[in-house]
Image (tube, rainbow, N blue to C red):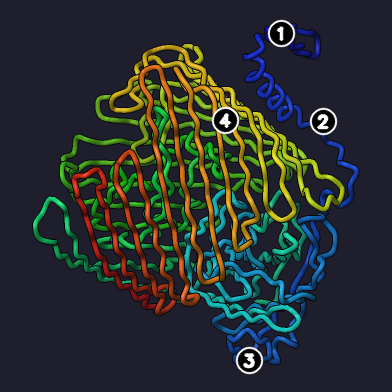
C-alpha cells in the first residue's frame, strides 16, 4: 500500500495554515514541530503533575552542624572516637529511586567533625541483610552505579553551581569528581588528596573519610564557613538511591542548588598550598624497522600553587602522558571524523571552566555532532592520536568572585614534519541570576615558523529558568592564514526537562571556512536542526518494570542554500527494569546526499547521488551488578547502494571485586553494488586489584582494518597520595603476514611533595 500524505494544521492566534507533507518527510518534520512548540510555549499541555505521589519533592532547608574535635581521629572505619558520638546526625534519607519522596528502606547516619587541618565524615549504613551487600570493584574512580555505596558533595562557595564529590563503597574504594554548573561538566579524572576506610559488619557497613582543607577551594573572607552539602546512598540489590536533601529522580547529587547547609566550620584556613610532583621516565622501544632497541631516559615536573584560596596555578615541564590508558579502537564507516574523549590528567583539571557552549547531548552517542571551539585533545596529539612531545606549559584557573577564569598556554616540540607549536586559550565566564552564565573565549595556535596560525573567538550564554527550562547559545569566529570569509559558527538550543517529559531542540549554523583547530567540528558549510523528545512514564509499583521510555529524535543537515544533505531519525521504545537491565527497539529512517564521491574503502567509492540508509535496531543489556552480565546490539537495514548488518556483543565475568574480565566484539557486514566487505574489532580487557592502591590492567585489541593486534598492559601502584609507580607494556603486532611488531616497555615514577 502506498503511504498516505500527512496533513498538519499550524494554528496561530489569528489563522490556521494547512500544510501537506509526504509520508517520509512527516517522519522528520513532526518531531521538530512538536519539540519546538513544547519548549517555546512553556509546555502548558504538560504542566499538570501526574497522579502518582511524590512526583516532585520540595527543596528542604536541611542544616547539619559540624563540631570541632580536639582528639585524634583514627582512620579505620570503626567510628569509635568520642567525637562521633557527640556530633549531630544527618539522617531521615528519602528515596529518589525507585519511589521518589518515600523514606529510605534502610537507615543511614552521617556525622561531620573537623580540626585545624581536616574535615572528617563518619558514615553508618544500616542493612538488615548485610550478606547481600554488593561490591563490584576496588579500583580508583570505580563505577558507583553497580555497587552499594556512599557519596558526599561539598559546595564550598555555596553558589549552588559547583562542587567536589567524594564517593566510596563498603570495601573502601575511592572516587572523586569535580563538578561544574550542576553537572554540565563532571570531571571524573580530577584527583585530590583524601582518604577513606570502610568496613562491613553484622548490621551493615561503616566508613570514615578524611579530606584536608588544602584539597578544597573556598573563600576565607568570613570567620564561619557555610557550605552546601548533600549525602547519597545506593543500595544496589534493590537499585535504590537515597538522599539526605531530596533530589528529583531526573537529577543526581550534582544538583547542588538542592543541597543542605553545613554550618559550624569556624576559623579554618586552606593555608599555603604548594604541590610539586617530579617524575622520571625510562623506556625501551623496539621498532620493527630497526635492528636494535632505543633506550630513553627523561624527566619532568608538575607544580600546583594556590594563588588565592579559589585560584590555582598549574605548571608543567616536559609533560609526559605515557601512563594514560589507550583509546578503544573504532572503525569509521561515515564520512566524518570520530570523537575520542580527553583522558590526560593535566587537561582535565578545572576542565569545566574551559568548556565553551553547552553540549546538551554530551553523554549520548550524538556528542560528535557538537561543535567545540576548544577541545584539549588537539594539544600534544596528532590527527592519528599519536603523542607529540610537550615542552611545557602553564594554566591559571578558578574563581574570582562571580567570575570563572581560565588561562592556558602550552608549547609543543617539533615532531617529524610538524613544527614546534604554541597553544593558548583565554576563557572568562560571569555568573548571572540564580544559575545562569555568560562568557567569552579566545584560542590561538601558532607554529614556530610564524606564518601558520589559527585563532578562534567566541561568546556563549547558558540560561536556566526555574528547574526545568534551559536555553543555550554561542557565536564564534575563526581566523586562519589566507582565509577571510565564511568563517563563523553559531548555535542555539532549548530544553524542557521534568520527571515525565524531556523536549530539546538545537539549531547549528556552521559556515564553510569555520575551522577551530583547537576544537572539534564534524561538518562545515551546513545548517542543522536537531530535536529530541522523551517520555518517562512509570507503572505503579510493577515488580519487573521500573520505567517505560518511548522517545524519538530527528536531525536535519542542510547546505547554505537550504538544500537537504542528511536526515537522521530515531523512533524507539525502551524498557528499564528494576534490576538495572534494559531493552530497546528502534526504527532509524535516514537519508544522505553525496555531493562528492565517498571512498568508504580503499577499493570502493560510492558515486554522487541520494541514498536511503533506513535500519532497525535492537539493544538488550543485563544487570551489570551480577557476576555475569552482557549486552547485545544488533542493527540491519539499507546502507547506501546496498545493505549493512552490524552486531556488537559484550560479555563480562566479575567473580569478585578484585577481578573482572570483559570482551567486546563489533562486526559490520556491508554489501554494496560497488563491492562488499566485512570489518571486525575485538577487544579483551582484564582488571585485577591487589588492593585499593595497587592495580593491574590489560587491554588487547584486534582491528581488521589495520590487520593489527594492539596490547596495553599497565601496572599502577599508588605508593603515596597522588604519587604513582607505573610499569607499562605496549605492543602493536602486524597480523597481515608482514610480521612487523613494535614494542615498548615504560617505567614512570611520580612523587607528590606538599608544602
Return the x and y of residue 279 as percentages of the image width and height: 29, 71
Q: Residue at x 46, y 42 (%)?
A: 666
The residue under label 1 is 4
Q: Are marks 2 and 3 in contact (CB under 8 Å)?
A: no
Contact? badges 1 and 4 (CB < 8 Å): no
Please report whichever mark, 1 or 4, sits nearer to the chain's N-terminal start. Answer: 1
Residue furthest out toward the left: 291
Looking at the rendered image, the disc whose residue lies closer to the viewer, 2 or 3, is 2
Residue identified by numbered label 2: 44
Q: Which residue is mark 3?
A: 70
Residue visible at 30% across and 35% down in the picture? 454
Spatial separation of the CA atoms under disc 2 and disc 3: 57 Å
CA gap, disc 1 and disc 2? 31 Å
Q: Does the rendering let one see residue 65?
A: no
Label 1 – label 3 distance at C-alpha: 79 Å
Q: Quadrant of the N terminus?
A: top right
Q: Tell me the mark number nearer the camera, choosing from 1 and 4.
A: 1
The residue that mark 4 highlights is 492
Between residues 203 and 382, which one lies in front from this camera angle?
Answer: 203
Q: Helix, strand or loop at disc 4?
A: strand
Amino acid at each position: 500500500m502506498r503511504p498516505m500524505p500527512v496533513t498538519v494544521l499550524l494554528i496561530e492566534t489569528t489563522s490556521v495554515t494547512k500544510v501537506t507533507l509526504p509520508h517520509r518527510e512527516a517522519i522528520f518534520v513532526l518531531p521538530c514541530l512538536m519539540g519546538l512548540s513544547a519548549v517555546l510555549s512553556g509546555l502548558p499541555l504538560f504542566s499538570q503533575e501526574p497522579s502518582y505521589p511524590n512526583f516532585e519533592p520540595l527543596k528542604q532547608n536541611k542544616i547539619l552542624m559540624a563540631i570541632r574535635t580536639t582528639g585524634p581521629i583514627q582512620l579505620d572505619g570503626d567510628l569509635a572516637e568520642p567525637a562521633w558520638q557527640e556530633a549531630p546526625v544527618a539522617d531521615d534519607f528519602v528515596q529518589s529511586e525507585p519511589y521518589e519522596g518515600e523514606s529510605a528502606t534502610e537507615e543511614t547516619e552521617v556525622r561531620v567533625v573537623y580540626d585545624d587541618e581536616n574535615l572528617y565524615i563518619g558514615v553508618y549504613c544500616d542493612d538488615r541483610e548485610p550478606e547481600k551487600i554488593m561490591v563490584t570493584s576496588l579500583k580508583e574512580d570505580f563505577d558507583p552505579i553497580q555497587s552499594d555505596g556512599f557519596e558526599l558533595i561539598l559546595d564550598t562557595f555555596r553558589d549552588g553551581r559547583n562542587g567536589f564529590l567524594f564517593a566510596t563503597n563498603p570495601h573502601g574504594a575511592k572516587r572523586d569528581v569535580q563538578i561544574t554548573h550542576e553537572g554540565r561538566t563532571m570531571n571524573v579524572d580530577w584527583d585530590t588528596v583524601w582518604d577513606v576506610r570502610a568496613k562491613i559488619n553484622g548490621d551493615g557497613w561503616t566508613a570514615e573519610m578524611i579530606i584536608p582543607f588544602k584539597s578544597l577551594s573556598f573563600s576565607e573572607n568570613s570567620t564561619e564557613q557555610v557550605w552546601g552539602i548533600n549525602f547519597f546512598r545506593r543500595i544496589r540489590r534493590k537499585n535504590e538511591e537515597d538522599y539526605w536533601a531530596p533530589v528529583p529522580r531526573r537529577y543526581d547529587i550534582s544538583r547542588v542548588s538542592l543541597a543542605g547547609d553545613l554550618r559550624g566550620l569556624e576559623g579554618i584556613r586552606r593555608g599555603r598550598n604548594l604541590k610539586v610532583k617530579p617524575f622520571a621516565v625510562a623506556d625501551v622501544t623496539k621498532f620493527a624497522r630497526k635492528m636494535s632497541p632505543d633506550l630513553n631516559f627523561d624527566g619532568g615536573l608538575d607544580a600546583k600553587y594556590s594563588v588565592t584560596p579559589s585560584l590555582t596555578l598549574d605548571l608543567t615541564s616536559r609533560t609526559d602522558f605515557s601512563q594514560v590508558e589507550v583509546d578503544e579502537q573504532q572503525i569509521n564507516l561515515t564520512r566524518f571524523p570520530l570523537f575520542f574523549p580527553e583522558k590526560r590528567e593535566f587537561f582535565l583539571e578545572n576542565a569545566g571552566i574551559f568548556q565553551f557552549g553547552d553540549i546538551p547531548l554530551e553523554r549520548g552517542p550524538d556528542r560528535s555532532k557538537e561543535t567545540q571551539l576548544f577541545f584539549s585533545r588537539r594539544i600534544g596529539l596528532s590527527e592519528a592520536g599519536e603523542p607529540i612531545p610537550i615542552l611545557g606549559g602553564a594554566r591559571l584557573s578558578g574563581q574570582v568572585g562571580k567570575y570563572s577564569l581560565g588561562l592556558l598556554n602550552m608549547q609543543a616540540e617539533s615532531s617529524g614534519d610538524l613544527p614546534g607549536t604554541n597553544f593558548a586559550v583565554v576563557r572568562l565566564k560571569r555568573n548571572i541570576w540564580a544559575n545562569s552564565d555568560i562568557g567569552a573565549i579566545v584560542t590561538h595556535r601558532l607554529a614556530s615558523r610564524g606564518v601558520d596560525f589559527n585563532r578562534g573567538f567566541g561568546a556563549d550564554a547558558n540560561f536556566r529558568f526555574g528547574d526545568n527550562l534551559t536555553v543555550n547559545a554561542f557565536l564564534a569566529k575563526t581566523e586562519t592564514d589566507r582565509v577571510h570569509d565564511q568563517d563563523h559558527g553559531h548555535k542555539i538550543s532549548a530544553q524542557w526537562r521534568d520527571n515525565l517529559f524531556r523536549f530539546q531542540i538545537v539549531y547549528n549554523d556552521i559556515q564553510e571556512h569555520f575551522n577551530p583547530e583547537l576544537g572539534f567540528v564534524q561538518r562545515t558549510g551546513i545548517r542543522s536542526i536537531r530535536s529530541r523528545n522523551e517520555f518517562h512514564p512509570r507503572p505503579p509499583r510493577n515488580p519487573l518494570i521500573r520505567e517505560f521510555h518511548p522517545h524519538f529524535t530527528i536531525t536535519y543537515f542542510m547546505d547554505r542554500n537550504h538544500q537537504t544533505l542528511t536526515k537522521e531519525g530515531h523512533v524507539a521504545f525502551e524498557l528499564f527494569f528494576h534490576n538495572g537491565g534494559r531493552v530497546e527497539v528502534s526504527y532509524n529512517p535516514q537519508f544522505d546526499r553525496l555531493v562528492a564521491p565517498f571512498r568508504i574503502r580503499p577499493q570502493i567509492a560510492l558515486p554522487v547521488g541520494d541514498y536511503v540508509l533506513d535500519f532497525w535496531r535492537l539493544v538488550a543489556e543485563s544487570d551489570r551488578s551480577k557476576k555475569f552480565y552482557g549486552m547485545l546490539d544488533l542493527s540491519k537495514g539499507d546502507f547506501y547502494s546496498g545493505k549493512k548488518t552490524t552486531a556488537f556483543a559484550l560479555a563480562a565475568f566479575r567473580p569478585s571485586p578484585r577481578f573482572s574480565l570483559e570482551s567486546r566484539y563489533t562486526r559490520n557486514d556491508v554489501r554494496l553494488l560497488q563491492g562488499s566487505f566485512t570489518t571486525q574489532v575485538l577487544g579483551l580487557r582484564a582488571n585485577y586489584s591487589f588492593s585499593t592502591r595497587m592495580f593491574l590492567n590489560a587491554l588487547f585489541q584486534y582491528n581488521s582494518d589495520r590487520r593489527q593486534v594492539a596490547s596495553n598492559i599497565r601496572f599502577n601502584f599508588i605508593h603515596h597520595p597522588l604519587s604513582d609507580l607505573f610499569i607499562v607494556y605496549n605492543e602493536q603486532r602486524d597480523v597481515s603476514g608482514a610480521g612487523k611488531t613494535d614494542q615498548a616497555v615504560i617505567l614512570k615514577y611520580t612523587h607528590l611533595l606538599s608544602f
